[in-house]
Amino acid sequence: MSTPTDAPVGTATSAAGPDPRPASPLLGRPGAVPAEGLDAGVAWHYGDPTREQRQLARGEAVTDLSNRGVVTVSGPDRLTWLNSLTTQELARLVPGVAAESLVLSPHGHIEHALHVVDDGATVWITVEPGTAADLVAWLDRMRFMLRVEVADVTADWAVLGVVAAPGEAGPPGVTVDGAPPAWQDPWPTLAATSASYAAVPDVEHPGLERPWREVIVPRAGLADLLQAVPLAGSWAAEALRVAAWRPRLRAETDHRTIPHEVDWLRTAVHLAKGCYRGQETVARVHNLGRPPRRLVLLHLDGSEHTVPDPGAPVVAGERQVGHVTTVARHHELGPVALALVKRSTPADAPLSVAGQAAAQEIVVAP
């Protein structure tokens, strides 16, 4: 896990250099340390990442996700149109009910991950940081003569993350009158029209311990809204995500990732709906084969003071069998990582990363 640079508040940094996304006003909180990479623009932690993580897990703290993009789709054809373009059945989406959908390439590789909720007149979509403009540009090219309007509203709306089960209020002070419906993460609930590639029964899935919710609030006044609310940085949120085996775009995915490899059919793919881009690959792999790679959780040797960086090779003996995708320090599990390994890697193979022993916990069955 790399250490963020000492970036000044008001700018964001990433591994590629300056980031055009504005830094969150919450980086002005005492003790805030800016994050890098995917989470540039928000806080990595606020001085005590272990305590923050425990508070977040108990539903007492809020994670700043204001670097995420927010896209709206309005118009009478919005649901049927999105249904024709993405992997999830959205044509009959009930207002206020959250869904997850993917945009695939013609060859079935994951390009966008959409967190979707409809308010009865507008579909609200949150996406990974830095991807909203690309998504809007692609959607605009797909409009043709349909009655839809697409807008990037990231400048006006911000996203917050909380641990809260359906029906629970979540931390006090987060909800705002007139705001869009919250997005309740469906992970890891398996729909009747989806498929599980996990190595454990659904009732034992660790994702059940992380009921995740994204709340969309006006960006103006964000710091005032959360003035009295405990904050948890991206360190805490990512650790809970890793422990829940939850894949993330641009972390667990690369240019050739298909949904099966990271068990994303579970919540984001409808296997009985009409045609969409990339459907042929999804159906062929699901019905006739197995994915070439599989997601694993690695329990890293906790005796080291450092942890490997994302992208570090996963080695069995002297042979590289995969690479690390996300590394985290979990408040109970210690140092852990998600990694993609070759499907043929034996489930009992001793693995190592950057010279550290890495015990393999199977996520996607080999």
Image (tube, rainbow, N blue to C red):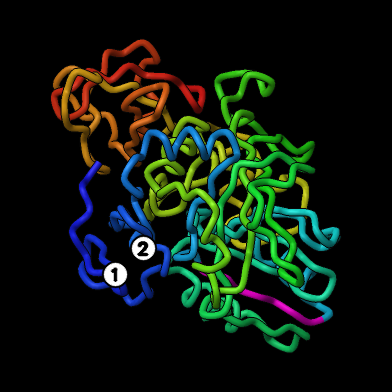
What residue span does the magenta drawing correspond to? 69-75
In the image, is 49 to the left or to the right of 196? left
The numbered mark, 2 or 1, whose residue comes first in the sequence reads 1
Across and down, in percent, residue 246 comes to 52, 39
Query: x, y percentage for residue 166?
Result: 75, 42
Residue 71 part of the magenta-drawn span: yes
The foreground one among 118 and 320 is: 118
Q: Main secondary structure of the magenta part?
A: strand
Residue 228 lies, in percent from the top left, at 54, 56
**In the image, what residue occupies the spot 64% across and 57% down?**
174
The mark found on residue 9 in the picture is 1
316 left or right of 211 in image? left
**71 is higher (above) or lower (below) than 4:** below
The residue tagged 2 is 27
Seen from the viewer's position, the closer of residues 62 and 293 is 62
For this orientation, the residue located farthest to the bottom is 145
Q: Is disc 2 placed on a helix, strand or loop?
A: helix
Judge whether 218 appears above or below 192 on screen.
Answer: below
**Could you say which quadrant of the image residue 327 lies in?**
top left
Q: Is residue 146 left or right of residue 29?
A: right
- Tell me what residue is drawn at x 18 percent, y 25 percent: 319
Element on which disc 1 rests: loop
- Report the quarter where the N terminus lies: top left
Nearer the observer, 147 or 125: 125
Q: Residue furthest top?
A: 348
What amino acid is found at the position of numbered circle 1 in the picture? Val
Neighbourhood count class around disc 1 (C-alpha, 10 Å): few under 14, some 14–19, many 20 upward: some
